[in-house]
Image (cartoon, helix red, strand yellow):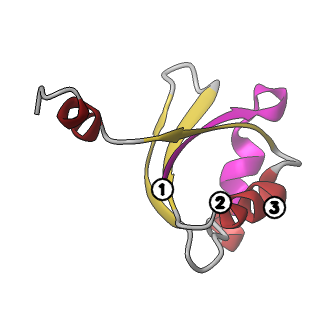
Amino acid sequence: MLFMVVERFKGRDPGPVYQRLRESGRATPDGLRYVDSWVEVNVDRCFQLMECDDPRLLMQWVLQWRDLVEFEVVPVVPSKDVRALFGAG
């Protein structure tokens, strides 16, 4: 399963997040895979694509970062898969 994770840096300050990332890494549990991420130009939000078969792994990861980040998690599927459902493949 794919999840688009929308992160809002608490206090609009990404510094503590990047500091922890440097010191401890992404800290993803085994079975949760970081795919890629994008940061808004104004550095207000980060969009991460994560992949796992067990959503509890994603929840475990979110709990480790919630002191620095507010999360919105959206299950997603690749658009090519949706196009195929509608015969627009």
Amino acid under disc 1: Met
Q: Which mark is in front, 3 or 1?
A: 1
Q: Residues within 10 Å of mark 1 (few under 14, many from 20)?
A: few
In the figure, is residue 30 to the left or right of 83?
right
Q: In this image, 36 relative to 80: left or right?
A: right
Report the span colored magenta. 1-20
- Would residue 41 be found to the left or right of residue 21 on screen? left
- Determine which residue is flagged by label 3: 64
Dot 2 amino acid type: Pro
Instruction: Report the amino acid beneath label 3.
Output: Gln
- Residue 4 falls within the magenta-colored stretch: yes
Residue tagged 2: 55
User: Residue 29 shows which numbered tag?
Assistant: none
- Residue 15 in the image: state x and y as whole percent: 72, 43
Residue at (70%, 70%) from the top-left corner? 23
Please report the residue visible at 56 percent of the width from the left and 19 percent of the height from the top. Answer: 42
Q: Secondary structure at mark 3?
A: helix
Image location of residue 46, percent across then percent down: 57, 35
Q: Which residue is mark 1?
A: 1
Q: Nearer the viewer, mark 2 or mark 3?
A: 2
**Residue sitting at 51 percent across and 25 percent down?**
40
Residue that lies at the very extreme toward the right in this rendered image:
67
Camera-nearest residue between 80 and 22 = 80
